[in-house]
Image (cartoon, rainbow, N blue to C red):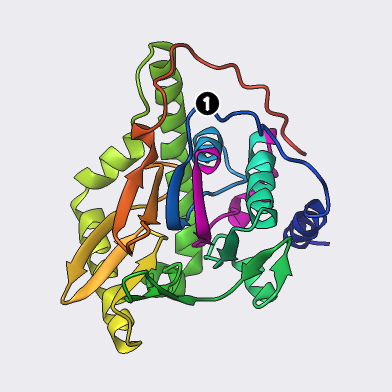
Amino acid sequence: MQRDDAFLRAWHDTATRALDPEDDDRVRPPLQFRTLWISDLHLGTPGCQARALLDFLKHTECETLFLVGDIIDGWQLKRHWYWPQAHNDVIQKLLRKARKGTRVIFIPGNHDEFARKYLHHNFGGIDVAEEWIHETADGRKLWIIHGDLFDGVIQCAKWLAYVGDSLYEFTLKLNRHLNSLRARMGLPYWSLSKYLKGKVKRAVSYVGDFEVAVAREARKRGAQGVVCGHIHHAEMRDIDGILYCNDGDWVESLTALAEHADGTLEIIDWAQHMPVPTKATPQREAVAA
């Protein structure tokens, strides 16, 4: 049996358990939103900033939560099974939100494309969909999609994408070591990989081409805007009359897209909301073999 199928079964079974992890961490009052979008968590990889993500999930509340793809990194899990307790806690927290009344909608991406076999199914109160049209409080229609279908590398040469993914994981490993040192020094989180990406002209050009292609397709679908992930670059801007939104990621930028009660949209940089570490926190995360 493939591990991706086993994991989805575990996801479904977990919904029946009465586990509410760390429910007492409410010193900071939660921020209230109408809708939240997060993507590119890459659970199952060392690069996932699971503790920051848990902090975000604990201290935000919303009516609808969109999981816009690459929630679970099936590519990396097939190479090496990595599932520490913090990653399990994230899944538990998402399931708990669904049980408590938040509508949670999961739109698979390329790293968790195995979940596309389960479109229109419900796992523990979480709906799985290929895409979505969301209407904001002020009446705008937003097309929700992960975005990998616009990536020429993914579409035309998947093996090249796997090679690029391995190099990216190496950069994230350097990023983890750097931030471990910064934490010991009492310094806030800073993304080396995000900084390097911003300095590479080819990457900047790719991001621009991607954004234009996604916005053009949103226009064809009659939407006033689009929300996607995939490229790990949080952004919100107008492209020829279409509102392009990218909610970023949780391996580099620690960002989300939020809709307020009046329909106003903003990108949340959660690194700005987290307390600055005073000392390194020892990690006691068990890795599942």
Q: Quadrant of the C terminus?
A: top right
Q: Percent from the top left, x then y, of residue 63?
A: 52, 59
Q: Say whether residue 177 is magenta.
A: no
Q: Residue at x 62, y 45 (%)?
A: 44
Pointer 1 residue: 27
Q: Percent from the top left, x then y, of residue 124?
A: 74, 60
Q: Is residue 43 above or below residue 159?
A: above
Q: Residue at x 18, y 71 (%)?
A: 239
Q: Say whether residue 65 is magenta.
A: yes
Residue 250 appears in the figure:
no
Q: Which residues are magenta?
A: 57-85
Q: Is residue 62 left or right of residue 203?
A: right
Q: Is residue 143 left or right of residue 45?
A: left
Q: Residue at x 49, y 35 (%)?
A: 52
Q: Quadrant of the N terminus?
A: bottom right
Q: Give the farthest residue toward the front.
A: 262
Q: Quadrant of residue 157?
A: bottom left
Q: Residue at x 68, y 35 (%)?
A: 84
Q: Quadrant of residue 187?
A: top left
Between 231 and 25, the residue placed more toward the observer is: 25
- Label 1 neighbourhood size at 10 Å, few (<14), some (14-19), many (20+)? few
Q: Percent from the top left, x then y, of residue 81?
A: 70, 44
Between 279 and 141, the residue placed more toward the observer is: 141
Q: Percent from the top left, x then y, of residue 60?
A: 49, 44
Between 196 and 213, the residue placed more toward the observer is: 213
Q: Is residue 207 above or below residue 82?
A: below
Residue 96 appears in the figure:
yes
Q: Give the farthest residue toward the left.
A: 240
Amino acid at circle 1: Val
Q: Is residue 261 left or right of residue 30?
A: left
